[in-house]
Image (tube, rainbow, N blue to C red):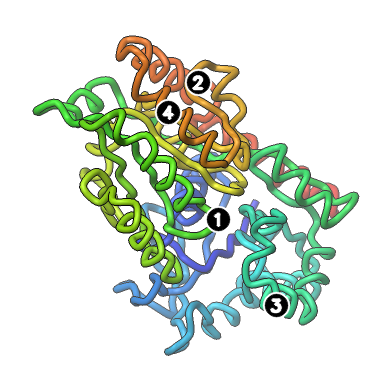
Amino acid sequence: MRVLHLILGYPPADQYTGPPPQVHRLARELRSLKVDVRVVTTNGNGPTTLDVPAGRWTERDGVPVYYGRRIPRTVDLSWDSWREIDRASAAADLIHVTGVFSWVGLAAAAASRRRGVPVVISPRGSLDPEALSFSPWKKGLYLRLGGSRALEHAAAFHVTSEMERAHVANRLPGARTEIVPNGVIVPTQDELAGWARGPAAAPTLLFLGRIHPKKNVIPLVRAWAAVAPRHPEAQLVLAGPDDRGHQAEVERTIASLGVGASVRLAGLLGGEPLSRLLATSTCLVLPSLTENFGNVVAEALAFRVPVIASKGTPWSGLTDHSCGWWIEPTIDGLTTALDDALAIDPAVRAAMGERGRRWMIEEFSWPSLARRMAAFYVDVVSRRA
């Protein structure tokens, strides 16, 4: 089976969190199962351009990738990629699109109608009511210009949680959905010990993700201001890229509350620095108003770090598996959970982390998730046939 996967950003791009590395890992695992996955993307990397062969097929870790040239002074538009989507779809059995509100969805729908190839869409949180409230006029315009028709034309939707399945059903009653969660790479015990080696770190509460209003960072900072006096040795680290200038508002809030000495804005991290930070953190905090999955939760648990996640995320399993807190995304809810995470006995906290790591090993390993996705593809194609 040949699958054409479409996504706007793709490794080695490092300015996007979440879907690009997930799609790349999935493509690698699927190819190991003899599913011929090929990726069409752009050479965009946020405000910069990737140094990759553009306008032709190349390979990334064994995955065939077409990096279309981004049109200058646009965020992600590429006529190269649009044309290649039309050409490559002629040999595809299925087109898989990551994301909703972009031109690739329109290109996929056009290719599907022309070639008779079924389309699977991964909304990645785009159809969440909270997400739809951001830039509503742009999203409304997209839907009127063909986006709604593209969604209705899709053969099926890949979702990562029951919460996201409900969001798709609200928008498209009767649409077929299949849950395949994101996968996670679980470090070995030796790797974890190596990253944690060195002087004992100060108790660290870690936020990892985009600095964006939907991530609810300002209420987190306000909760921290209430907690910090009771834990003077602790620190809050906000690690992630600024999204649309929201970091300036976060910085003003930090300054106005007088907690600048205990809050660190670490920016976008990856590789060894991120691994060391995760391995030495006391707890990860994801206070988002909405998340379709929340990769950072799985990553932290794989590093045996307990997690505080809001009920805007699909991580109720944190309480079921006794490895974290699932709370209301309010200042009061965050304040209580932050206090608890810092005050509990270190041995109890370590046991929470180990339970989370075992959970990731048992239910979120990449090989098993790739097999589920491959079976989903076969079913979609056979139904269309």
Point out the residue furthest to the right here.
Answer: 174
Earlier sequence position, callout 1 versus callout 3: 3
Please give the residue where the numbered disc 3 appears in the rendered image.
Answer: 137
Q: Name the residue located 78 percent from the left edge and 64 percent from the top edge.
A: 151
Q: Which residue is mark 2?
A: 359
Measured along the vertical axis of the image, is residue 65 above or below residue 341? below
Q: CA distance from mark 1 to mark 2?
A: 27 Å
Distance, label 2 to label 4, CA atoms, is 8 Å
Amino acid type indicated by mark 2: Trp
Asked if the residues shown at circle 2 and circle 4 are in contact, with their CB atoms under 8 angstroms apart, the answer is yes
Of the image marks 3 and 2, the number of the one nearer the N terminus: 3
Relative image position of residue 71 (x, y in whole percent): 47, 87
Q: Nearer the viewer, residue 288 or 362?
A: 288
Cα–Cα gap, marks 3 and 4: 37 Å
Q: Residues within 10 Å of mark 3 (few under 14, many from 20)?
A: few
Residue named by callout 1: 214
Q: Nearer the viewer, mark 3 or mark 4?
A: 3
Residue 370 image offset from top left, x and y in percent: 57, 38
The residue that label 4 is drawn on is 301
